[in-house]
Image (spheres, rainbow, N blue to C red):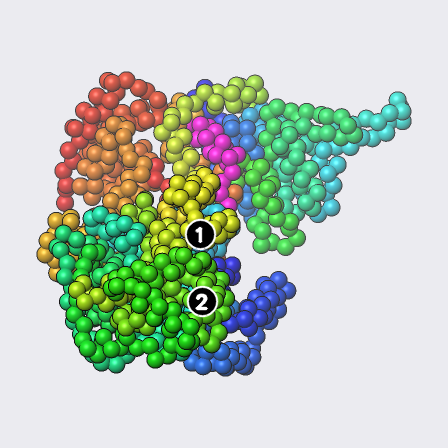
Amino acid sequence: MCAFLLAVSPHVTRLPVWLAGLAIIVFSWSYKIVTAKGRQPGSILRIIFLFTVIFFLFKHYHTLLGRDAGVAMLIALTLLKFFELKSQRDFMLVVFLCMFIVLTSFLYSQSIWLGIYLLAVVIILFAVMMYLNHRVRHDLLGMLKRAASLVMMGLPIAVLLFVLFPRLPGGLFGLPGDSHSGLTGMSDTMKPGSINELNMSENVAFRVEFSASVPAAKQRYWRGLVLEQYQMGTWKEHGEDEVIENQIRYSPDDVVEYSILQEASNKKWVFALDIPLARPADLVWGRGQTLRSIGTLRERKEQKLQSATDYEFVGVTEKERQRNMDTSSVTGERVKQLARELYSNSSSNNEYINSVLSFYRNNNFIYSLQPPLLGEHPLETFMLDTRKGYCEHYASSFTMMMRLAGIPARVVIGYQGGEWNEQGGYMIVRQSDAHAWSEVWNEKRGWIRVDPTSAVAPERIEYGLSAIRQLVEQGQQLGNLTGDQLQSVLSGSLLNKTIKDLRLFWDGVNTRWYKWVIDYGAENQTGLLKWIGFAQTNWSKLVYLLVALVSVVVSLQAWFLFHRKKIVDPTEILYQKFCHRLSRIGIVRSPSEGPAELARRVIKLRPDLQQMVRPVTEAYIAIQYAGKTGLDRQQQLRQAVDNFRPKRIN
Amino acid sequence: MKTRFYEVRRFLNEIVLGKEKQIDLCLCCILAKGHLLIEDLPGMGKTLLAHALAKALGLGFSRIQFTSDLLPADITGVSVFETGDSSFRFHKGPIFSSVVLADEINRASPKAQSALLEAMEERQVSIDGETYPLPDPFFVIATQNPLEQTGTFALPESQLDRFYMRISLGYPDRKSERLLMEKEDRRDYLNKLQPIISTNELISWQAEVNSIKTTPALLDYVQDLVDQSRNSPEFINGASPRAALDLVSGGRAWAMLAGRDYVLPEDIQEVLPAIIGHRLTLVMEQEGQTNIGINPAYRLLELTPV
C-alpha cells in the first residue's frame, strides 16, 4: 500500500481531488479488513464503485483516452483492486500495476530527480515482491538490500540495452503532450505589457553551445519574429504574401556555428543568433530571415545552426517597403510634430536616427519594469509624457518615429544576452532575457539593427535583465554608473556568487542528462558507435553486438556470484581435482557429502579403488580437519591425487 | 579409555537391543554435558535406556513422572518444619540425582515444566533464598509423547532449545524384537549388572571432549550450516548461537566416540539431526500442505555444501 502511494505520488498534483477521497475509502476499508477481520465488499458494490469511478473520470476529463485521463484511470482502478486482495495473485497484480504507474510518470517529466526517485520506488516494489514470495521474514531492511542489489546487477544490462538497442529516430518518450497544456513562451504579437510578463520568468528558453568562440554580449541578439504591422497599439507579424528568400552579404570569417537546445514552447519559433544563414532540413524560413520549425515545438529539440554576426541584410520588395512605412494607426498630433521637427533638423536619415536616440537619452527617459499605462494615444503619451518603459516601449516608439519620418522600420522580438555556464561550457538564455529591438532600412546597407533600449539602459544589453533588477533593488539610477561601479554592485556577496555557481553547475548536469539520456536517439547512437570504432552499423550488426555484450555482462556477473567463495586453498584445489576424476567414472560428489563419507561410498561402489582412494582421503583429512600442517603433507596429498587414475568399468 | 568406552557401549546395547545409533547419541550427549529429550510412544524402552545409562556409568538415578497436577516442589523438594529442632529443613526432591528421568514431560503444566528446565539450565536449585547445587555430572533425560496425544502441553521453542539433543527410539527391528522376547527380562538383567565406570572417570572424559581438535575448515562448515538455516527461506527461524556451540561440542563428542582426536564434517552431520532437529521449523510451502515428517535438519544438510 505504501509502495503504491510512493508510486503514485509524482502524479498527485495532476489528479482530480476526489481520487484522494476514493483512496481514503479504500484504505480505511482494507485497514478494517486486516485488523478487524471486516468483510471485503461484495461484487455488486464493487461494480457500483467501478462505474461511479468511470463516470467521474469521464466527467472530469471528458474522455477516457489520452495521457491524463488514462493515467488517472489506471490509478483509480489500481486503487479499486485493493478491494479484492485475496490470493497471492492479486497482490502480485497490484505490484505490477504499481510498476506500470511508475512508468507513466515519465510521460510527464524526465528529470534526474524523478528518475532517482522512481528507481528507489522500483527497489521498494521489488522488496514487496520478495516479501510476497517469502512471507516469512519480516526483515524489511534486508529485503530492500537484496532488491537493491538485484537492481544494481540489472543496471549494466539496462545501460547496454539503452545504448545499443536499435532506435527509431525520435526522443525517449516521444509522446505528444496534451494540446491544451500551456507553456510559457513568446507570443506572436507585441503590445506594451505582454513581454513584461515573460520578463519575470526565470525559466530557460534555450541553451546554446558554440563550436568556437562565443560572441560578445552586445552581439547576442536571438532573432525570433519580425513584426511589421502596427494596429491599435499592437505589433503583429505580417501574415499575407509569401515569404521571400532574402539576400545576406557577409564575410565567411564572421560565421558562428552553434547548436541550440530549445525547450518545448508549443510554438514554432526557432531563435537563431542574428542573423541565421543556412536552413536545416526540418526548418522553414519565416518572415524577415527568421527560422520556424515545421510543427509546433512540443518537446525539447536540438538544432545545429550557422549565423553571421556582421552582415548586410539587403533586398526589399516594394510591398515590403510600403508595409514598413505604414503609420495609419498612429494618433496624436504632438508626436507627429516632434518627428517632423527632429527630421527637419537632420541632414540625413542616419542623423535622424541619432537624433531620435539622443532624444531618448537627453529627455529623462527611464528604463522601468513597471511603466504606467499609456491610454488612448500610446505613442504620444510615451514619447512626451510618461517616458517610462522597457524594451517594448522603446522598440515600438523608435520604429514608429522612423516611420513617421518616412523611413521603413520594423520591430524584431527575440532574446538578448544569455548567461554563460562555465562548468557546462554553454550559454543559458532564459525567458527573462526576452527583448525587442528595431530594424531600420538603409538604402545602401539594407536592414540595420538599432536597439533604442541601449540608449536608455546600456546595462540591459551588457549585463541582462537580472542586473537591472538588482540595480533597481539597490536604489541605483540606471545609466549613471561607471563600468567599475557597475561591476562592484553586480558581483555582490560571496554567498550570492556561490549560489549562482551551484545553480549553473546543476543546470549543466541537467543539460547533459537531457542531451545524453532523454534525447539519446538514433543520431547519438551512430555517433557513439562511430567513436567506438563501428563506422557503419545497421540493425542486425547492432543486435549482434548487443547480444554479445549482454551475454558477456551476464556471464561475468554469474561468475562473480558463483565464485564469490573462490577456492584459494591449495589443499582444496587438489581435492577438487580428485573429485573431478571421480566424477569421470560416474561417482559424483554431492555438495553436502563429507570426505570420509565419499570415500566410504566410493569403496563400496568400487572396492578395487580402495588402495587409491584411501591415501587421498587420509591426507586430505589430515590437513584439513586434523590440523596437520607442513609441506610434506601437501606433497603427500599431491602424490596421492596424481596417482589417482581410476578407470571406468562396465 | 577407548576400550572402556566400548564396554559401556556394549553394556547398553545388551540392555536396549538394536538401537546402536541412539545409544551413541545418548553417550555423546552425556559427554558434551547436554540434556536429552526422547520423543516416542509409550513402551519403546525410554525408561530402560535411562536406567541402563545410570547403571553403566555408576550414577545415582531418580525418576519423576510428570502429570498434570505435578507441582514444582514435587521436583525440586520442599522445606518442612521439623518439630524436633523447631526449624525448617529442606527435603531434597528427586531432581537431586545425577541421572534424572523426567517421564512424559509434556503432561505436566508449564509451571512444573519450567521448574525442571530452570534446574537443567542453572545446575542448581534455589528455594527460600538458599541455593542448593545439583550433583555433577547432572544429566536429564526427558521423554515426551508425540504431541498429537490428548492432555499434553507442548514445550515452547525456548524450552526446546535447552535440550541438547532430541532423539526418538522407534520400533525395534524384527530380529531385535525376537531377541527381546527370547531373552530374560531386560530390567531384571540390568539389576544384576555392575557399573562399568566410575563417576570420576566420566567427569574426566567430559573434560577430554574439549581437547578434540576443530580446524578452521570444520568451523567454516558449521558456520555455513548455521548461516544457511538463518538465510534460507525454507526455515522459519535460524539456529541460535547456542545451537552452533552445541554442534561443535557434539561433533567433538562424536569424534571422541569414534576414537579420533579431530572432528570431521561427517561427525557434525551425524549429530546434527539430533541437535538441530528440534530447534528448526520448515516453512510450510503452501497453505494447507504440511511438512510434518520431514526432519528440517536433513533438509539443512542437503542445502549446505561441505
| Residue depicted at 44% across the width and 75% down the height | A377
Can you tell which quarter of the image residue A261 is in? bottom left
Left or right of A423: which side holds A136?
right
Q: Position of residue B132 (x, y in %)?
A: 71, 25
Is residue B200 at all visible to an observer of this figure? yes
User: Looking at the rendering, which quadrant does residue B257 occupy?
Assistant: top left
Residue A66 seen in the figure: no
Name the foreground residue: A155 vs B215.
A155
Q: CA distance from mark 1 to mark 2?
A: 20 Å
Classified by dominant secondary structure, the portion drawn in magenta counts as: helix
Residue under the point 22% across and 76% down: A320
Residue A145 horizontal/vertical position (percent): 43, 46
Mark sitting on residue A384: 2
Relative vertical location of residue B212 with respect to residue A237 in this rendering, above or below? above
Number of residues whose C-alpha sits closer than 10 Å to that of mark 1, classed few (under 14), some (14–19) or many (20 or more): some
The foreground one among A404 and A63 is: A404
**Where is residue A559 drawn, in percent x and y?**
26, 43
Q: Residues within 10 Å of mark 2 (few under 14, many from 20)?
A: few
Which numbered disc, 1 or 2, marks the residue that appears first in the sequence? 2
Marks 1/2 in contact by CB < 8 Å: the verdict is no
- Vertical placement of A249 versus B151: above or below? below
Magenta region, residue range: B228-255
In the image, what residue occupies the spot 14% across and 42% down? A649
Tell us which disc is closer to us: 1 or 2. Answer: 2
Report in which chain the residue with disc 2 lies. Answer: A
Query: What is the chain identity of the residue bearing mark 1?
Result: A
The residue indicated by pointer 1 is: A478
| B264 relative position to B157: left or right | left
Kindly state the secondary structure of the residue where label 2 is placed.
helix
